Image (tube, rainbow, N blue to C red):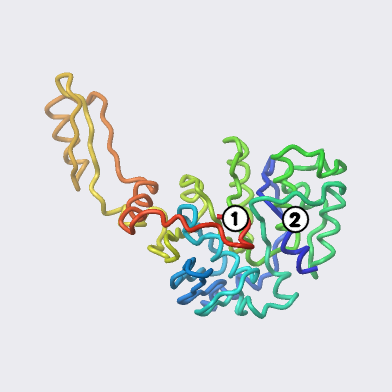
Amino acid sequence: MDNCLRNQTAKIAVPKRRVVHERLPPRGRIAAMTGAKAIEAAEVTKSYGDVKALRGVNLEIAHGQCVALLGPNGAGKTVTTEIFEGYRKRDGGDVRVLGTDPNHGDRRWKSRLGIVLQDARDLTDLTVRESVTHFSSYYPNGRTSDDVIQAVGLVEKADAKAGQLSGGQRRRLDVALGIVGRPDVLFLDEPTTGFDPEARRQFWDLIDDLKEDGTTILLTTHYLDEAEHLADQVAVINRGRVLAVDSPDALGNRQKSQAVVQWLEDGVQKSASTATPTALVGELATRLGPEIPELAILRPTLEDVYLRLIADDGGDLNIPTVAGGGSRG
């Protein structure tokens, strides 16, 4: 059963429309009210021979939060996530997920997790309904297959075999298997890679619904707009260390950074950095008129801040793939 739970899901699914889900048990909300953390990690280390994959990871995630773990390939995102899942053992440090050390998590603890991997190619001979029903039976309080299939937008493909699904439909099935057990903590690894813009927006709606239900979500993604939309907190990791944790709009002091005002004057493109962009625009309007040509006010984006943090830390370490690590980055 443990292997089944681990391999149940791959990349993320997307719903065609938003629906009202069955509500999760209130234990996550109760824990949040008491101040308990869903995930706690202190000075976590992991090495593979001479390669130090994690060099003292520190991270706390509150119940009901969505946290995006950002970093270049080889930064330590996957190793960190797999340690939290109980799939990989750490060398040092302390970890608690739902109050339990993942190294000693029993089946009841594992039943409270949902895992959606980057890639999975199993279940090809089962229909969508058979797959969801089968995995629902593993959990003490699994959701009904009809509810889950509707939630991920696969009603029309309920009786189709997984091997006959398109790539996007297969991802919908994968997320169905990730949420069928009503997880308190959901791990999403690069969920929307390859999605078209409409499919990504539909997936975001599903994640918003899960957050409303109190699900704690750890998301790894290379899409900075996705992190900005979904995440309550962003954690930037590089070379096996967490460099910064903050809300997307406050990371790296984005809110306090100077704005860049751009405009066209006498046929020349001009710009100025300022802490008071409104005042500068007022001055320009007095001089150039109310319609300032090609006016733009720019502040650092999340991508700008992320790239600066990585550059300041020395860039990408390019940690090689280790045995047993698979393709998860």
Q: Which residue corresponds to mark 1?
A: 328
Q: Position of residue 259 (x, y in %)?
A: 24, 44
Distance from the alpha carbon under mark 2 to that under mark 1: 19 Å
| Residue drawn where x is 60% and y is 74% of the image | 89
Q: Is residue 304 above or below residue 32?
A: above
Q: Please give left or right for residue 136 compared with residue 206 in the image.
A: right
| Residue drawn where x is 13% and y is 34% of the image | 283
| Circle 1: element type | loop
Q: Quadrant of the N terminus?
A: bottom right
Q: Position of residue 195 (x, y in %)?
A: 61, 39
Along the viewing direction, whichever of 76 and 264 lies nearer the viewer: 76
Q: Residue furthest front?
A: 50
* Rendered image: mark on residue 177: 2
Q: Is residue 68 above or below residue 226?
A: below
Q: Residue furthest top?
A: 267
First of labels 2, 1 by sequence position: 2
Within 10 Å of disc 2 (Cα), the crowding (few <14, some 14-19, many 20+) is many
Q: Position of residue 154 (x, y in %)?
A: 77, 42
Q: Is residue 44 above or below residue 217?
A: below
